[in-house]
Image (spheres, rainbow, N blue to C red):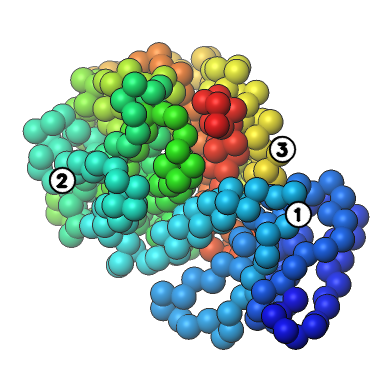
Amino acid sequence: MPEGAGVDAIIGLGNSADAFALGDAAKQLPEGDWLLEGELGEIDPTLAMVAFGAGAYQFSRYKKPSRAAARLAPVDGADAAEAERIVRSIWLARDLVNTPAGDMDPDGLQAAAEMLARDYDAEVRTTIGDDLLKEGYGMLHAVGRAAHSAPRLIELEWGNPDHPRLAIIGKGVTFDSGGLDIKPASGMRIMKKDMGGAANAMALARLIMDAGLPVRLHLLVAAAENAISAGAFRPGDILASRLGLTVEIDNTDAEGRLVLGDALARAVEDAPDLILDFATLTGAARVALGPELAPYYTDDEKLADALNAGAAKVADPLWRMPLWDGYDSQLDGTISDLKNTGDGPLAGSITAALFLRRFTGGRRWCHFDIFAWNPKDRPGRPAGGEMLGSRAAWEALKTLYGK
């Protein structure tokens, strides 16, 4: 209740065990500090705090909020520090995705990564523009070379080098016009969110560093804008990759797998114990599962079990998809090692994941094909950018690495 006000409010959860039903209260209650009393039923107290904090989110960079959201005191039985850590990471991911591409271009994404590094005393190395070609990142360079803000690979390193090495990779396409295979206007309207994979990767990295997870973290953000100009890459071009494979371009709007492929190849060079990549990669994933359910791909059963358990625990639903070997040959090129799409419109999310697998070097790996966007308001999940799948990944990482 607000301090000194002596005001009570009744929050009805109905028959729902969804913790995020509490998310609406943050905006419906008057401004002030509130204490949650009563039975939560099956809802975990820490998750209840996360839901309330997620519901309190307001994107205020361009428009002042009409009023401040209510604040929740620590809930009995909750890990308040963990709840705050998760809420602030959710807010980070949402802020990054919600910022328009004019302010969140590759320069802006680099600035955000550098700020994150300063907060946790991490090291950052960035390879920009034509230096990408010198270091073999031909696919990342091609995708972003037509834009005003040069493409780049942003790498953040943190943690004890003696700890297990964990690579987290984010697709950072800050705006996707589709390139010369241009999207229709309706398909381009929310493409500021095409760096949602990078936003989720950075939010997960924040969780890892803030909690002090005993890993050697290697965050890689492949940042580019898929723009159109005289210098844009073309259908039919053949690109050289960091791994040494050549890739023929069937469609310039299948660009995310290109930037990720180069980042994956870089990550593999340091022999990580685990690689996670996050990307707003395919429309096929949305057709299959919609915007609320994040598909993931892995061949590792222990990792899949940890992800499924984590997803259920923190109400961040995931759905495992198959890396179906029968479709892998669709990616074989005729005048190149690979092509960047399958043979047709079917199984598009699977063939995209299989393309990425070609760059993983047999390491333990998981790919998340996320939407990173709420099309409409839901309790605790306002319309706009979202942290999707990476909260479940965080829970799995705590299980795997003993935090």
Numbered disc 3: secondary structure: helix
Q: Is residue 182 above or below residue 218?
A: below
Q: Between label 3 and label 1, give the one nearer the viewer.
A: 1
On the image, the x and y values in percent for residue 245 come to 24, 20
Residue 321, can we see it? Answer: no
Q: Which residue is mark 3?
A: 312
Q: Which residue is mark 2?
A: 128
On the image, the x and y values in percent for residue 239 come to 21, 31
Q: Quadrant of residue 99 in the image?
A: bottom left
**Rendered-image quadrant of the N terminus:** bottom right
Q: Is residue 306 above or below residue 387?
A: above
Numbered disc 1: secondary structure: loop
Q: Between label 3 and label 2, give the one nearer the viewer.
A: 3
- Name the amino acid type tagged 2: Ile
Mark 3 or mark 2, which has the lower sequence index?
2
User: Could you tell me how far apart the alpha carbons at marks 3 and 1 are, in whole angstroms?
Assistant: 22 Å
Residue at left offset 65%, top offset 23%: 305
Q: Residue 5 versus residue 175: which sits nearer the camera? A: 5
Mark 2 or mark 1, which has the lower sequence index?
1
- Name the amino acid type tagged 3: Ala
User: Could you tell me how far apart the alpha carbons at marks 3 and 2 are, in whole angstroms?
Assistant: 40 Å
On the image, the x and y values in percent for residue 390 come to 53, 42
Q: Is residue 244 above or below residue 239?
A: above
Residue 95, can we see it? Answer: yes
Residue at left offset 34%, top offset 53%: 119
Q: Which residue is mark 1?
A: 76
